[in-house]
Amino acid sequence: MSRFQRLLASSIGAKVGMAVTGILLSFFVIGHLMGNLLVYQGRQAVNDYAAFLKGLGPWLWVVRAGLLSVFVLHIVLAIQLKRRNRAARTVGYAKDHVNVATVASRYMVLTGMCVLAFVLLHLAHFTLGWIDPATHAVTEKVIQGGVEIERHDVYQMVVAGFRQPVYVVIYVVAMVLLGTHLFHGLQSLFQTLGVRHPGYTPTIVRVCRLVAVALSAGYISIPVGVLLGLTGAEGAS
Amino acid sequence: MQDMRLKLHIWRQAGPEAQGALRTYEVTANEHMSFLEMLDVLNQDLIEKGEEPVAFEHDCREGICGTCNMVIDGRPHGPQKGTTACQLHMRAFKDGDEIHVEPWRATAFPIIKDLVVDRAPFDRIIASGGFVSVNTGAAQDANEIPVPKADADDAFSYAACIGCGACVAACKNASAMLFTAAKFAHLEKLPQGRVESERRALAMVEQHDAEGFGACTNQYECEAVCPKEISVTSIAMLNKAYRSAVLKTRETV
Amino acid sequence: MQLDSKIPSGPIEKKWDNRRFELKLVNPANKRKYKVLVVGTGLAGGSAAATLGELGYQVEAFTFHDSPRRAHSIAAQGGINAAKNYKGDGDSVFRLFYDTVKGGDFRAREANVYRLAQVSVNIIDQCVAQGVPFAREYGGYLDNRSFGGAQVSRTFYARGQTGQQLLIGCYQALERQVKAGTVKMRTRKEMLDVVVVDGEAKGIITRDLVTGQIERHYGDAVVLATGGYGNVFYLSTNAMNCNVTAAFRAYRRGAAFANPCYTQIHPTCIPVSGDYQSKLTLMSESLRNDGRIWVPKKAGDKRAASDIPESERDYYLERKYPSFGNLSPRDIASRAAKEVCDEGRGVGPGGLGVYLDFADSIRRLGEDTIRARYGNLFQMYEKITGENPYRVPMRIYPAVHYTMGGLWVDYNLMTTIPGLYAIGEANFSDHGANRLGASALMQGLADGYFVLPYTIGDYLATQKPGAVGVDHAAFAEAENEVRARTERLLSVNGSRTVDSFHRELGKLIWDHCGMARTADGLRDALQKIPALREEFYGDVRVPGSGAALNQELEKAGRVADFMEFGELMCLDALTREESAGGHFRSEHQTEDGEAQRDDENYCHVAAWEYTGYGQKPNEHREPLVFENVKLAVRSYK
């Protein structure tokens, strides 16, 4: 058994794995939001950014593969922990009482599964275009280096997508759940990694929770903004 | 002194393999009794009526031996913070209350009878590494190594653990991390204990896992119910020490 | 029966060295062939089992608890004495020895006490090395506090939980040996008899408290570390399960029982609040460092404490014993409290209480300092009484706390049954007629870590390991007796609960053999106890069966033994026509009400030999010789 296997097989090590993958996934969540917020700068900013990503070519696939394995590891460890935890108490209390556990902390598996479902839906929706092909299949023509090229009009896709209330509802709910997941997860990972001190832990917890709420709000602002017409004016109806 | 009439729902289970169930009893208590004295009154009643008394564990009744263990209305040791069931007094309840009394629930703590469970896994966790390897007579003078007062006080606050298992009972994952970490942190804070830190972290965590306790999920229910109010800072210490021990150890893995 | 105390020759400071040299040794390679049974896992038993394991013996350790960590040593609050003289305030081995002999009212064996004082320093070293978090000063060095009966600060402490911390240190050492395979831990097993083969102890009979099985265990030697018998009073500061059964069974098999009438009444306990009360809670003696004890000067004064002006308060300990004041020894402070309550000056419901007042200290040192020193004790007081001792004075009253009497042992800690040892509170050896505060922990650990592991080898070296097996007839006989006793208790099926009998017995003993004893009262008790015992065997109700966990059956067996033991206690108290330490005979007091010893006739240990159920036991006397401390009237004035 290698050191890493030994680590990940233990209850503490599995949590360390959750924490480390959680950090990486959080970086992705932050980065992705940065990209998304370009909507507020208009069509060109969004579509330039999309084209830049696509232009990474094989590097994009490296990043995607890395992201996928982190995501899978996060899920596999979650399953491993859940099985251990479920086996550790098979009979519950007739009368239960919660003292200090936050709602977020009590539903990590549920919020996590919802986020997973949402990620799959989101990929099918905006990345692969399986759900709403008509909205997905939009392009724009731009002049680049004196040559006119046709590229994916991500801006139009997003705006058109979020002008349909059903998607807005799905995305808003999903982002609330993601925020809930992070509300516990972000601050919790410091404890798991052994960073705790009576002096600065309260601040860490507050900042982490604030970040979770801010991320959630940032994501939610886009579909809601589009639906209410606060942004997305450049998009064709 | 006002009498209080109470309705108790108590878990009764004849033996380890028997089917258990909550049974309802009525008892008259007063506010000066401890919770266990109220159960004594019930038991005397039951015996006089020809029924079997409720089996529950208790010994010192001063909140220090860690023997008493029961979940009262969903809370290990009951509603009063920093208090064991034996030190909980009936003034925390009022006339007419209905109270649920259940055993610690954890796969690692099988029920022996009624409210009595087997907490032997705790001894095995200590045996795995919760000690300093010093034989009798091998010690140097006690004042040879000065220990900063703050460290000694911290060590004491972790060593105050009474091994009752409330942390396990309260944790939704029935994790014994607070118990394990309290012992680790106690010894980690002292120069005498630090010598074996790496071995101890590895052995204790792996014994904890082997006993079938769940993983810590950082909700801190354990800290909230701990009758000795032991801090979850100990768990952070153990998390860090275990991780670094696995990665650094020269033991054959 | 011959009492040979086997005190070593030579001057007192050389005796232990001489003895260690004389003792026969067991070759290290042979040690693993010997099996030692240790019953009880408190400070004495736990430390003995761990140390014997380290030495390489095969050890089996027994406890009726679910874990060795639960033993009642855990509840000791205040501290542990040691002659370290870290304070440079004039302490020494000789002074600790002297204070202990004097504190014990000159009824302890000098040589034992001196050894205790000698090894006290090693105990602290050992405990610190184990990681016991004693209180420290800012410089990082160990702190000390003062305790009753001493004018030096020699008490090491870990907040108000010293016993807990020492026991956990010892428990860790024990579990280390469990892991190493030298000690087999037998939890939830209660010892119900000693097996004596050809006059020597070779095993025990236990009942498994979970399965109800009666089991035989063989050992080349047996060590009893089963604590004291304070629960004979029903209400005491002992844990609910503390009992005399193991020691009493040994007594029935031929071990002499010494000085059973020496019981310690602790002056500072929380008063009784009602008849449902199951036990009493001690408030550490260390509180007397900063608390002042008083009652109103007027009898029947029902005013609240704060309404009684300074001039109408009687700080009776400070008044009567100006040089020791509130830190007078326990027996003296307890009796003084009883006196003022008997005069009708007691406070609180029922008038059985005196004030322990911190108002002066809080004014002088601030509430924070007091909280740092006694925070957990104040908290405990508030939990139990619902009163805040930072605002109103505590109410305290004496309660049974410790028993100095116990199985008679020689200097090597062996009882009158060869191969059977008794250590810690279970023996009688070191405290005489009164124990000083913070000395019980010291004695338990001294016996377990530093004395028994040496002396037991002297016996084992003469034994062929594993000479008799559990199939020996003596095992069968003892097992059958245990079975018969258990079945008898289960078959009565009378109308009264075990607790009701225990409560009645306890009250009888408290009234007649408590803080003050009279010949008439004791004779009365000696009439009533056998009658109560007959009623017990005719009318007790023990529900359930013997084949499973049955807490009522456990209690019934223990109470049955208390029923016989209580009689022995009263007999000893009646026979000792003097007052000494915890044994106060009202007929024997000085004009100002102090205990009056009779050194001419009673300067001895009374060791009782069992002669049969309901028969009067034989008294044997071990004379006490004082060569190093002059017999004097104990004065704390």
Image (tube, rainbow, N blue to C red):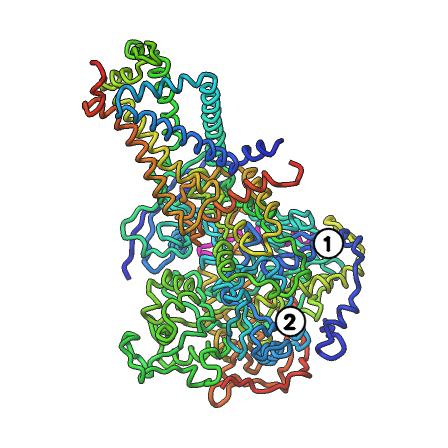
Give the camera-side residue of C525 and A4: A4
Task: Reply above or below: C588 against C199.
Answer: below
Give the camera-side residue of C375 and C64: C375
Location of residue C462 (image quadrant): bottom right
**Which kind of residue does numbered mark 2 sit on?**
Leu
Residue C315 visible here: yes
Residue topped by disc 2: C116
Q: In this rendering, would C615 be left or right of B156?
A: right
Segment tinted magenta in the rendering: C475-498
Task: Reply above or below: B50 against C24.
Answer: above
| Sooner in the amino-acid sequence: mark 2 or mark 1 | 1
**Which residue is rendered at x = 41% and y = 44% of the image?**
B220
The answer to whether residue C477 is magenta is yes
Task: Reply above or below: C524 against C159.
Answer: below
Q: Residues within 10 Å of mark 2 (few under 14, many from 20)?
A: many
Discs 2 and 1 share one subunit = yes
| Residue at mark 2: chain | C
Residue C488 visible here: no
Assess whether mark 1 and mark 2 are in contact (beta carbons under 8 angstroms): no
Q: In this rendering, would C591 be left or right of C23?
A: left
Q: Position of residue A122 (x, y in %)?
A: 35, 19
| Outermost residue, front side | A146
| Residue at mark 1: chain | C
The mark found on residue C57 in the picture is 1
The answer to whether residue B57 is magenta is no
Q: Position of residue B30 (x, y in %)?
A: 32, 58
